[in-house]
Amino acid sequence: MGETEVLVVGAGPVGLTAALELRRRGVDCRVVDRRTEPQPYARAVGVLPRTFEVWDAMGLVRDALEAAVPLYGQLVFVDGRPGPRVELQLPPDVPYGFAALPQDATERLLTRHLEAYGGHVERGTELLGLEQDGDGVNARLGAPGGAETVRARYLVGCDGAHSRTRQELGIAFEGDAFPEEYMLGDVEVDWDLPPGYAVRSLHHGAAGEVDDLLVCVPLPGRGRYRMSMRVPAELAAGAETGAGAGAGAGAEVAHGLEAGRAPELRHIQAVLDRLSPQEVTARRLRWSSVFRISHRLAERYGAGRVLLAGDAAHIHPPTGAQGMNTGIQDAYNLAWKLALAVRGAAADGLLGSYDAERRPVGAEVVGRTVLHARQGGAEADVLREAQLLVSYAGSPLVEPEPESGPGGRPGPRPGDRAPDCHGLTGDIAAYPVRLFDLLRSPHHTLLLYADEDSPTQELRACATAARSAARGRLNVFAVLAPGAPGDGLGVPRVHDRDKAFRRAYRAAAPEAFVVRPDGHLSARFPSPTPSALTTHLHRTLRGGP
C-alpha cells in the first residue's frame, strides 16, 4: 500500500493550486487526474484581481501576467443598438486588474510551478472508492498499471461537478439546471472593436425575454475570442438529464462540456450574422463544444479527513468568471490549514473553519451568478466581482471587530482581505517596497504599527510573546509612522514615510495587525498586549510544548 500525507484528486486549476501550496509548505502530496492528457481548451478564461494577488503570494504572478491579456470592460449591444459600456475600474491601491487567460494556459503555468517544488500529476489515474478512519483515508485508485490502494492522512476532492469524491462521501449537491444549452467556440474575428473589451449582444423576443445571446471574451492572440451562444436546434439534446432540484449525492449533474456534439464554424458564423455589432467573418476555429449549466452547492465541504474544493463543492453560471477563481481561493484557504494539520501544529477545529469560511462564499457566488444569468447581465459591484470583498468575519479563527464608538473602527475589519500599500522604505535599501512584499510568506505575519509616542518595551514584549505562541510560524515587522525611531523593538522595520499604510488600514498607533497566510486579517488590536496576541494565535496554532 502506497502512502502520502495528502492525496489531491483532480488536476484542474483548483487541484493544482492545492497541490502546489502543499508542496510549497513541504507537505508530501500526490495529485492524480483521470484524464491521460491535459485538456487543451479555453474553458474558464477570466482571471480576477484577487486571484492575481493569490498568485503573487504563491510566486507565479509574473508568468501569469506575461501570458494573460487585460480586460478593461464590456461592450453591450441590445437588439442591434449600442448599450452602456461597462468599465472595470478599480481603486488605485488595488495592484492588479482583470484579465483573460485560457484555462489550459493556467493549468500549464500551475503545473510548471508544481514541478519546481518536486510535484507532478499522475495522469490516467482515477479515484475508484475511499474509506476513512480517525487517522487517515484509504483511497482505491485505478491507473494504467493496475489498481492500487493509497493511504493518505487527508484527501482533497477537486474532481469537478461530477465529483466521485463527493459521491463517495454521500454529500448532497442540491440545486437545479438551466433549461438552455449553450455552445462555446475559440475563434478569430476581423472586427475593429476596441481591444481588451468583452462583447455582450442580446436580442429580446416579443414578450421582452432574451431569446438570443452572444458573449465574446478576448483571448491572447490577434482577434481571438472565446465565444458563447445558445445552441441551434440541430445540435440540441433531445432529453433533459439531471435537472431535478432534489439531486442527491449520486444523481447525474447536467453541467459542463458535452461529448460528441461539437459545433462547426458555420454554427458560430450564423450567430454572428444575427448578433455581431459589425459584419464579421469567423475563422480559425481552434476548439468548440456544447455545454450545460447547473447551479448547485454541496451541503458541506467535506467529512472527516476528506475535503471538497472548486466545482466538486459549488457550480453555477459562468457569469463574471467567478467559478474557477472561487475554486482557486477554496484551495488557497484550505492548503495552509491542511499543512498545519499534517505537521501537528493546528489548533483543534482548524480544519472545521474551512467549511465555516468557504461555504458561505460559495453560496453567495451561486446566488449572485444565478441572479445575473436570469436577468441577462445585471449591474455588478466591481469590487465584489473582483472578489476583493470576500470576508471571513464571524469565523472561529477571526477576532471580533475592535470597539471604537458608534459604527466601529474604520478600515479593514478582522476577516477582510488585507489591502496592499506602496512606499514602505527600509533602513538600508534605497527603493520602496509594497506591503505585499512583507506578506509573501507561508506563515502568519504580525504588523506592529508604532509612532514616536508608542511604548517600545510593551510592543517588544508583544513581538516576543507572539513568536513564542506561533512556535516559529510567524513573521513580525514594525511599520513605523514618520518620526518613530523603532529602536529597541527587536524586529525588522519599515518606514511609512508617505503614510500609505496608515491610510490603507486606518491605523492608530500603537496597533497590531495579524495577517493570515491567505492574506486575510485575522485580528487588529489597538494597544496590543502579549496575552491578547497569544490567545488569538492559539485559535489557529496549537499551543503548549
Image (cartoon, rainbow, N blue to C red):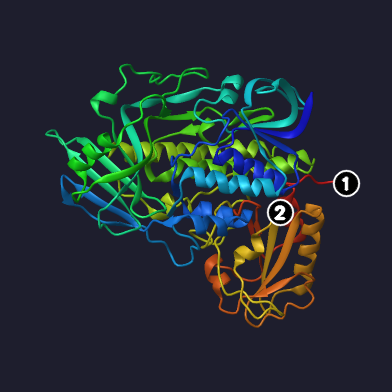
Q: Where residue 307 sits: x, y (%)? A: 63, 32
Few, some or many C-alpha atoms within 10 Å of disc 1 (few <14, some 14-19, many ≥20)? Answer: few
Q: Which residue, given by chain and number where applicable, does mark 2 sit on?
A: 443
Q: Which residue, given by chain and number where applicable, does mark 1 sit on?
A: 545
Between 324 and 483, the residue placed more toward the observer is 324
Q: Secondary structure at mark 2?
A: loop
Work out whether residue 347 can be spotted: no
Q: Secondary structure at mark 1?
A: loop
What's the CA distance linking mark 2 and mark 1?
19 Å
> Does residue 98 sit above or below 430 in this rendering?
above
Q: Amino acid at mark 1?
A: Pro
Front: mark 2 or 1: 2
What is the residue that sits farthest to the left in this orientation? 206
Task: Identify the residue at image location x=11%, y=34%.
Answer: 206
Q: Tags 2 and 1 in contact by the CB under 8 Å rule?
A: no
Task: Identify the residue at image location x=56%, y=22%.
Answer: 171
Q: Amino acid at mark 2?
A: His
Work out whether residue 134 can be spotted: yes
- Label whose residue precedes the other's in the sequence (2 or 1): 2
Task: Identify the residue at image location x=41%, y=61%.
Answer: 90
Q: Where residue 327 sits: x, y (%)? A: 53, 40
Between 254 and 306, the residue placed more toward the observer is 254
Say which quarter of the image contains residue 485.
bottom right
Q: Where residue 497 sits: x, y (%)? A: 60, 79
Q: Where residue 491 sits: x, y (%)? A: 77, 69
In this picture, residue 311 sits left or right of residue 484? left
In this picture, residue 195 sits left or right of residue 16? left
In the rendered structure, find residue 32 and report the number of the disc placed on it. Answer: none
What is the residue that sits farthest to the bottom in this orientation? 483
What is the residue that sits farthest to the right in this orientation? 545
> Does residue 353 sit above or below 481 in this rendering?
above
